[in-house]
Image (spheres, rainbow, N blue to C red):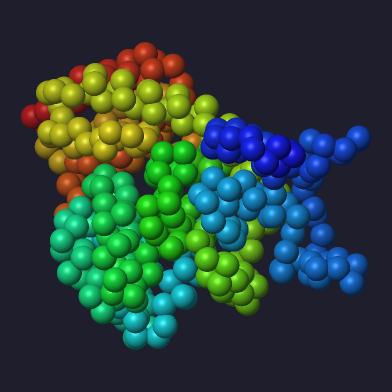
Amino acid sequence: MPDTPADAPALRPETVAVVAGRPPHSPDAPMNVPVHLTSTYVAGGELGYGRYGNPSWTAFEEVLGALEGGSCVSFASGMAAISAVLDLVAPGGLVVAPRHSYTGTVALLEERAQQGRLRVEFVDISDTSAVVAASVGAAMVWFETPTNPALELADIAAISAAAHEHGALVAVDNTFATPLLQRPLALGADLVVHSATKYLSGHSDVLMGAAIAASEQHAAALVQRRTLAGAIPAPLEAFLALRGMRTLAVRLDRAQANAQELVRRLDGHPALEEVRYPGFGAIVSIVVRGGAAPADALTRGTGLWVHATSLGGVESTFERRRRWPSEQPTIPEGLVRLSVGIEQVDDLWRDLRTALDSLDLLG
Ligand SMILES: *Cc1c(COP(=O)(O)O)cnc(C)c1O
């Protein structure tokens, strides 16, 4: 980051996203840390080998670490980061997690429980007293908020305080909110994970992940997991993810404003049973009346909105989540998760409304 006088006010996150992780302002220095395509380094320095470190990762990690308020360790994908964080739980330890979570996280927890590597208890994460009760004897309380795709909210501060009383670590998947809307470490969590594939990179062209630790000790343990398990990001992906983060604030502003306007217009549409929106962010879940068939018809009936999994890109996408057998049976068949992009909102609304209006409600 550029030199600032000691008494200058701390930079705001929108500025940090633009100015952090750049080379020093010296003559002929490049504006951006280049893509370092190398498998090894000349001996005698700190990096050593391409699996141990890469300056393109470090630039990305400086920015995301500064935004989340901790030490960032980048990984090959969100799942690689989640797997490394779960490796912090000692064998046989209890993990408390939301019933409604990213399907990959639930599958990983269930697999590790079946293998006897840990125990897992699934809870309704919006029921704070149930989460607090479950955290007695837990090694880790893990959650996302808002949850995917039910959009329930968890009380990060209350859960963190209670979990710490019982000696449990708290890890939060902050993919949906991003550090611009929610900073779990400041609310007491120990660890944050991201699928940088989503909002942070923001253009549906990168898979990458990250974990951010409040303590240096946990950060070092995560670096060790990355080095030994080898789930390292590619230098080009780290460059692209950082380039995406430079515009995170403006993308999120626009996408969130679009989402709020669409929620207003969708509310009360006769084809919908429910419009779920947690009040912030750009993910909206709608429940189509009549279940799977009309919801599938909606996903085939648009021109702008693309039926695709994943989220957080500049383009608007949507998905009927129960098309995946792995989605929880408590998620309604007709639930379609919207990832609202940065297009002009009237165009998005016209496309969506035309498809909704033409649903054959009797079919
Ligand atoms: C996509 C996603 C993940 C997994 O990330 P990958 O980059 O696909 O491995 C984890 N958590 C949430 C909330 C996600 O949306």
Q: Residue at x 21, y 64 (%)?
A: 131
Count of residue discs = 0
Q: Position of residue 79 (x, y in %)?
A: 47, 61
Asked which quadrant contains residue 248, the reply is: top right
Answer above or below: position of 249 versus 193.
above
Q: For this view, does 127 lie left or right of residue 348?
A: left
Q: For this view, does 32 lie left or right of residue 211?
A: right
Q: Quadrant of the N terminus?
A: top right
Q: Give the residue furthest to the left.
A: 362
Answer above or below: position of 98 versus 313.
below
- Answer whether residue 226 is visible to the viewer in this image: no
Q: Position of residue 174 (x, y in %)?
A: 42, 50
Asked which quadrant contains residue 135, the reply is: bottom left
Q: Residue at x 45, y 61 (%)?
A: 191
Q: Position of residue 311 (x, y in %)?
A: 43, 41
Answer above or below: position of 235 versus 306.
below
Asked which quadrant contains residue 110, the reply is: bottom left
Q: Residue at x 28, y 33 (%)?
A: 279
Q: Give the residue furthest to the front.
A: 7
- Answer whether residue 290 is visible to the viewer in this image: yes
Looking at this view, is 215 or 289 the one in front?
Answer: 215
